Image (spheres, rainbow, N blue to C red):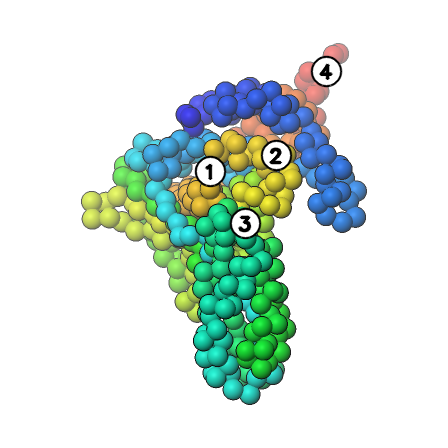
Amino acid sequence: MDSQTPDFRSFTPAQRLEAVALKAGLDAEDVRRLSRPGALPLETADGMIENVLGTFELPYAVAGYFRINGADVLVPMAVEEPSVVAAASHMAKIARGHGGFLTSSTGPIMRAQIQVLDISDPFGARHAILRHRQEIIDHANSRDRVLNELGGGCKDIEVHVFPGTARGAMVIVHLLVDVRDAMGANTVNTMAEAVAGRIEQISAGQVRLRILSNLADLRLSRARVRIPATALGSTGYPGQDVAEGIVDAYEFASVDPYRAATHNKGIMNGIDPIVVATGNDWRAVEAGAHAYACRQGRYTSLSAWEIAANGDLVGTLEMPMSVGLVGGATKTHPLAQLSLKILGVRTAQELGEIIVAVGLAQNMAALRALATEGIQRGHMTLHARNIALAAGAQGDEIGWVAARMAEARDVRADFARELLQQRRGATSPN
């Protein structure tokens, strides 16, 4: 596949779809689903959640130019915010000429937590539970033999003691479960409930909560990019100055939680749209990301940026990535399946690595803008189309009004209405 998408901005949606269909090998039914509203049938939606009235659509796009581990990838994104897709694609275009993104990941290990209360000797209970480690693992695995046949299943346990909580001593048992290509929530929750009774017997305590943890710190995805400083420059902004500015912006986020929150939100601007487009649980991914950002006792940047000895800019991102290819909306939503087809992924680990690479690209785009002309110029230029639409512009009027607001650097609803009246007055018959 060739992920390059030259001149996509000037194409119509139909022309873009035709180009992506050719690149990704989509069939006529795939094209039909993407070209018409209502890809999610109401009957399917009604079976997914409660009290369904209808469906809600988001813009669905692809980010181009990504090269990840030497392979080209087209990235589907479902998002409402302007500039996200353009920024990711632009950074991917810069990076692809210098090796693109390199990724890696750990195995798909999820945690289930079992809370045990009413224990007079919590450290003794911990010892007793660990003595029965294999029995607990085997009992958990008896609940999902298919997962075991696929090479997954409960692999180990941990036991954590909190001796002095407001509710007395707590012993928390963790089941460490390889969930293979699933997100894994249902699997680990079922296992936790299955072993709860036996843990009560072993510990002589009372089990309360039996639930997964969304801090998937054993299920990590990583991405790295290395770009010569000269490739980062633009008119009026020498590349080395841009690289230094990006590192300065990162250092700000690394020491200040107020900046880190916005810095990490920029990373999630790239991550969430792919998680949504593939039918995965973006709330779980968000929760894991922000909890992981606090793992050293304070909230800080998820990414890291540095200058190599030869002056190259090097960026890395590591974070939990609990996404799957099977189960839930990933299997029931037609466009989620189509997104996986466009991506061409074969495992959940591969999907997680692509998602983190896009998050790193999005982070680089935001920091580069902040280090040069500021975030608003490019963002507001694209946001101008939304303002033009809200003002009532249609067809060719949208681009015309947006362009004039961008030229004036004045993106406001009342200005858009004024421009629209001028345009229509100039083109109306006498």
**Residue type at numbered disc 3:** Val
**Mark closest to the chain's N terminus, 3 or 4:** 3
Q: Residues within 10 Å of mark 2 (few under 14, many from 20)?
A: many
**Residue closest to the eye, 419 or 328:** 328
* Front of the two marks 1 and 2: 1
- For the residues labelled 1 and 2, the Cα–Cα distance comes to 17 Å
Disc assigned to residue 335: 2
**Quarter holding residue 421:** top right
Residue located 72% across and 38% down the image: 44
Above or below: residue 262 compared with residue 396: below
**Residue type at numbered disc 2:** Leu
Q: Residues within 10 Å of mark 1 (few under 14, many from 20)?
A: few
Residue 304 position in % (x across, y down): 36, 53
Residue located 49% across and 49% down the image: 149
- For the residues labelled 4 and 1, the Cα–Cα distance comes to 56 Å
Disc assigned to residue 146: 3
